[in-house]
């Protein structure tokens, strides 16, 4: 600083204010540092520095220069400060300038990385803007580098009107400010980097197809990307995960059972579990037709391993699942066919499966009649009934719609508009009234090329088949062909079997044939019942061996082998063991058939049931009370439907009333009267649940029962209430016919209830084979001259065993697969212990009637223990 | 085909012959802002469905006279657009399969979670009628 400048400064008030004191400079430094720290980017930080320096130190123009992208040229930055309006011309000139290293103030500063002070730019040779500077009257200038490490990230320059000698102190202050700028910029850059990487992360999250959901350990959502919103619905972030999950339908893979809350992947991952490939079916108002998602979840842990929350990634696998279902559906159809399911069921399932693959598609299968000239209804679950009925029985021919023509011509027929196509001229009105517009049909051919039927697709608009539909047609005709062929083969087989069976049934024998080559067997219906096989289960040699009592298995096998070797007939007496352990004595006689080469073709056997004779040999030494109790427990087991149902009803009412009350509260609009009602309903339902439990407890209680005077009508009504649901589920009607003059009896209620339950459950079983409309049971009471009371339970089943009605009371006699064969024996012993009688007879008009008599109670008698 | 009147998407039909259960479900639905039309008999519901469009019905399975599944079968002919939610008092895989086959939207075994039930109701009402 020169002597003259010092004098000037003292003489000039203005100069005094622009030459800041040390305190002012420190304050400037502090102000700038704070403001720069608050600046959002380099450009606004530069602007702060330029303005503050000019305002405090009297420089009239401040500008910034920043290197261009490839670092070869300095460009004029957007940040500048100008105290006077007439300097704009110079600013404009600067904006149009670029400096290479070493040129002008910015270039010199850039190159030297040192401040550059010029007393008068108009006299300076290396100052390309000196002409404009002279025009606007700028002379003094200083340029300061802003360095990051060794790199110049910007150059700032300041100008004043008068020529100004170098002021070292000022340069230092501005350099110090610039250094602040550098520190701030480093931080800003790091922040910008972070923001950019966040932006990248956000962009990945926004654009990825998988849903990503992150929640903290309280279940509050931290990340819920757009795919997640698409998958699970929006506005999720406003709620916590535990609450939110209730608002969306999340189901188990069966698509209808709600997903258990505590098993949801997010919940599990928040709990610290790893979750792999959990499939969830989602349905909510934004995805009303549902979608499938496969979810993987991981817990989120902090650096020290503490649990912070959980993250799940969900992939939409709807398409994959749909294909999977379609394939599974096809396999299922083939299984149905293999298991000889009724043809109508197979075809209906086939049509439904295919219809599910395309929107608005309706399909049908028609069969060709045995005479080969008419169409017969096959399956068309979604075509109007009127249409289906009208088509059934039409003759096939060259102009009979799509199907009749396809069967006639033995080739596919595509009709894109039934209203104009001549093939449909006779059926236009019918199709129109049913809303059908396009129909294409393909004949179903047997492997021999014989027409079995046709497979058709219908649409409600005019159009031809899409390639996807051609593929479906191929699958449809293929599977329908297999099903129809199989049905025909089965019918032929059944006819021949039926003839043999008829002979065997009438002889009351089990008749069976073993085919050793194929390891398969055929058995008459009677035989299946005797051996405990279900009517359709496939039989092998193993099936028979498994039924032979282990003690005699070797002997029977030996008899078989001997018969095979010696080509003679054999006969052996042995026991068979039915599922659930029941045994039965039988005699089996058999012989082998050979072909010319001496190979065994089949072994034909006849089995006779000897149980009736053998059973009487068995002696049972079991305490009656103990047995009665066991049997009661078994009865409770049989009544599971009723008990579960009867308990679940009041529990449901309680749960729903409580949930409703909570919701009313949540919505802040609870009417005290409603609340009172909800609470009263909860109390009533609880009471009802208690009653049910008391009933079970009474039945299950072990030990002696106390006798008392009883009204049997009331006891029957109570008992029927207990099995209400079983009666419902078995779709049976129970009619009661009570004698109001029935005398009371002296009896143990629990035991008589047991007898009643036995008879009722048996009657329910007896009518089960009937069509639902015919399942009827009549329970009646009558007074026998006032001396005893009779209760009768009459069913409309097949009646008592033909050979010996009394057999039903024998130990271990059971017609039921799961029966112990003890119920009626015990029931009889209970009634007899009450000085009564339990009997059975075939009822007039079909079915069986079980009845018991109990002596009338003597009035004023004192209760005594049984 | 006859043009179909559009059903009110805020009305839920409910068929259950147990008065306590029926009333509690009504309250639950009302608490979430739905209107409920309740029926104690399957037949009276079917009569209603013949004359009025029904968007959604909640059916109990085991009822006197006619089971919920039979109602579903009848309904699929009578009003194919009606969506069905089944509730049942017992675990019953066979009934569930049948219901699935008939196109049930959700299947609840009593007692059930009220929130899940309501979310199924909302989801069902949002479904497009095919």
Image: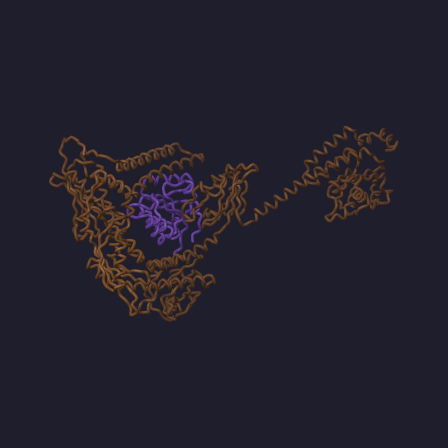
Q: Position of residue A389 (x, y in %)?
A: 33, 61
Report the side of A189 relative to A131 (left or right): left
Q: Is residue A185 above or below residue B70?
A: above
Q: Give the vertical position of A859 relative to A567 (above or below).
A: above
How far from the left and from the top, in percent, is residue A785? 11, 40
Q: Residue furthest right?
A: A4
Residue A864 falls in image quadrant: top left
Measuring 79% from the left and 29% from the top, which residue is drawn there?
A: A21
Q: Nearer the viewer, residue A467 or A664?
A: A467
Side of A540 relative to A751 (left or right): right
- Residue A264: x and y, percent? 46, 43
Q: Give the quadrant of the C terminus of chain A.
A: top left
- Residue situated in front as seen by the camera: B111 or A521: A521
Identify the residue shown where x is 71% and y is 38%.
Answer: A45
Q: Colour of chain A?
A: brown
Residue A382 seen in this snapshot: no
| Spot occupied by residue A630 in the image (x, y as percentages of width and height) | 25, 40
Quadrant of the image containing the N terminus of chain A = top right
> Chain B's shade in the image?
purple
């Amino acid at each position: 600083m020169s002597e003259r400048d010092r004098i000037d400064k003292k003489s000039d008030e203005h100069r005094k204010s622009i030459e800041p004191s040390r305190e002012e400079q420190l304050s400037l430094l502090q102000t700038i540092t704070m403001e720069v720290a608050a600046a959002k980017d380099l450009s606004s930080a530069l602007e702060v520095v330029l303005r503050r320096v000019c305002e405090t130190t009297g420089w009239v123009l401040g500008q910034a220069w920043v290197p261009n992208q490839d670092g070869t040229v300095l460009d004029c930055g957007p940040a500048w400060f100008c105290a006077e309006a007439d300097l704009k011309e110079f600013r404009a000139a600067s904006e149009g300038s670029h400096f290479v290293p070493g040129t002008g103030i910015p270039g010199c500063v850039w190159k030297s990385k040192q401040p550059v002070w010029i007393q008068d730019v108009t006299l300076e040779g290396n100052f390309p803007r000196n002409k404009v500077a002279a025009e606007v009257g700028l002379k003094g200038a200083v340029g300061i580098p802003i360095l990051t490490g060794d790199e110049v990230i910007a150059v700032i320059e300041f100008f004043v009107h008068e020529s100004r000698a170098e002021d070292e102190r000022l340069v230092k202050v501005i350099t110090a400010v610039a250094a602040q700028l550098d520190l701030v910029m480093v931080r800003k850059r790091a922040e910008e980097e972070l923001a950019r990487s966040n932006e990248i992360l956000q962009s990945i999250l926004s654009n990825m197809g998988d849903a990503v959901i992150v929640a903290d350990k309280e279940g509050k959502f931290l990340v819920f990307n757009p795919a997640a919103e698409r998958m699970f619905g929006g506005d999720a972030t406003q709620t916590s995960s535990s609450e939110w999950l209730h608002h969306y339908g999340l189901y188990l893979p069966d698509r209808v059972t709600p997903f258990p809350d505590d098993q949801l992947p997010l919940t599990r991952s928040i709990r610290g579990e790893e979750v792999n490939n959990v499939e969830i079916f989602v349905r909510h108002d934004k995805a009303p037709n549902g979608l499938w998602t496969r979810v993987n979840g991981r817990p989120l842990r902090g650096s020290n391993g503490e649990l912070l929350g959980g993250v799940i990634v969900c992939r939409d696998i709807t398409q994959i699942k749909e294909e999977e279902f379609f394939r599974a559906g096809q396999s299922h159809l083939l299984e149905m066919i293999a298991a000889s399911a009724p043809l109508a069921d197979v075809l209906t399932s086939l049509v439904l499966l295919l219809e599910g693959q395309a929107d608005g598609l309706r399909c049908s299968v028609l069969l060709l009649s045995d005479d080969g000239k008419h169409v017969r209804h096959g399956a068309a679950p979604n075509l109007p009934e009127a249409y289906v009925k009208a088509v059934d029985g039409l003759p096939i021919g060259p102009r009979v719609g799509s199907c009749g023509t396809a069967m006639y011509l033995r080739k596919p027929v595509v009709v894109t508009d039934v209203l104009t196509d001549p093939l449909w001229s006779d059926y236009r009105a019918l199709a129109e009234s049913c809303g059908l517009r396009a129909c294409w049909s393909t004949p179903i051919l047997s492997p021999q090329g014989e027409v079995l039927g046709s497979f058709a697709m219908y649409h409600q608009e005019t159009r031809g088949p899409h390639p996807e539909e051609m593929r479906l047609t191929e699958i449809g005709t293929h599977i329908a062909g297999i099903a129809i062929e199989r049905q025909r083969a089965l019918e032929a087989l059944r006819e021949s079997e039926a003839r043999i069976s008829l002979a065997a049934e009438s002889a009351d024998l089990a008749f069976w044939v073993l085919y050793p080559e194929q390891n398969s067997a055929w058995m008459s219906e009677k035989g299946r019942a005797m051996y405990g096989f279900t009517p359709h289960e496939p039989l092998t040699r193993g099936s028979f061996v498994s039924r032979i009592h282990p003690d005699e298995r070797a002997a029977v096998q030996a008899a078989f082998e001997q018969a095979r070797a010696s080509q003679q007939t054999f006969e052996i007496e042995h026991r068979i063991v039915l599922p659930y352990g029941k045994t039965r004595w039988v005699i089996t006689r058999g012989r082998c058939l050979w072909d010319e080469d001496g190979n065994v073709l089949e072994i034909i056997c006849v089995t006779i049931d000897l149980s009736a004779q053998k059973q009487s040999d068995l002696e049972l030494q079991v305490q009656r009370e103990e047995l009665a109790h066991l049997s009661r427990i078994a009865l409770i087991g049989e009544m599971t439907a009723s008990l579960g149902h009867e308990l679940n009803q009041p529990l449901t009412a309680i749960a729903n009333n409580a949930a409703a009350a909570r919701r009313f509260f949540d919505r802040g609009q609870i009417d005290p009267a409603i609340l009172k009602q909800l609470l009263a309903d909860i109390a009533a339902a609880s009471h009802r649940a208690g009653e049910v439990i008391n009933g079970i407890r009474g039945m299950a209680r072990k030990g002696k029962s106390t006798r008392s005077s009883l009204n049997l009508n009331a006891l029957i009504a109570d008992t029927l209430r207990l099995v209400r649901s079983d009666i419902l589920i078995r779709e049976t009607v129970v009619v009661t016919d009570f004698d109001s003059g029935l005398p009371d009896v002296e009896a143990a209620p629990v035991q008589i209830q047991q007898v009643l339950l036995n008879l009722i459950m048996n009657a329910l079983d007896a009518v089960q084979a009937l069509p639902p409309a015919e399942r009827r049971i009549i329970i009646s009471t009558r007074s026998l001259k006032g001396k005893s009371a009779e209760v009768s339970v009459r069913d409309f089943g097949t009646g008592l065993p033909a050979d010996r009605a009394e057999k039903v009371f024998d130990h271990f006699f059971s017609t039921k697969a799961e029966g112990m064969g003890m119920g009626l024996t015990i029931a009889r012993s209970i009634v007899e212990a009450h000085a009564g009688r339990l009997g059975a007879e075939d009822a007039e008009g079909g079915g069986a009637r079980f009845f018991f008599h109990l002596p009338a109670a003597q009035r004023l008698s004192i209760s005594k223990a049984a | 085909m006859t043009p179909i009147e559009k059903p009110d998407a805020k009305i839920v039909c409910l068929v259950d012959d147990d008065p306590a259960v029926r009333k509690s479900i009504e309250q639950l639905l009302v608490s979430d802002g739905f209107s409920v039309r309740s029926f104690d008999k399957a037949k009276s519901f079917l009569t209603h469905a013949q004359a009025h469009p029904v968007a959604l019905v909640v059916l109990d399975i085991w009822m006197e006279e006619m089971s919920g599944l039979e109602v579903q079968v009848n309904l699929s002919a009578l009003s194919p657009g009606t969506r069905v939610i089944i509730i049942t008092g017992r675990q019953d895989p066979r009934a569930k399969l049948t219901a699935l086959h008939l196109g049930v939207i959700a299947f609840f075994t009593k007692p059930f979670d009220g929130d899940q039930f309501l979310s199924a109701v909302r989801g069902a009402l949002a479904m497009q009628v095919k």
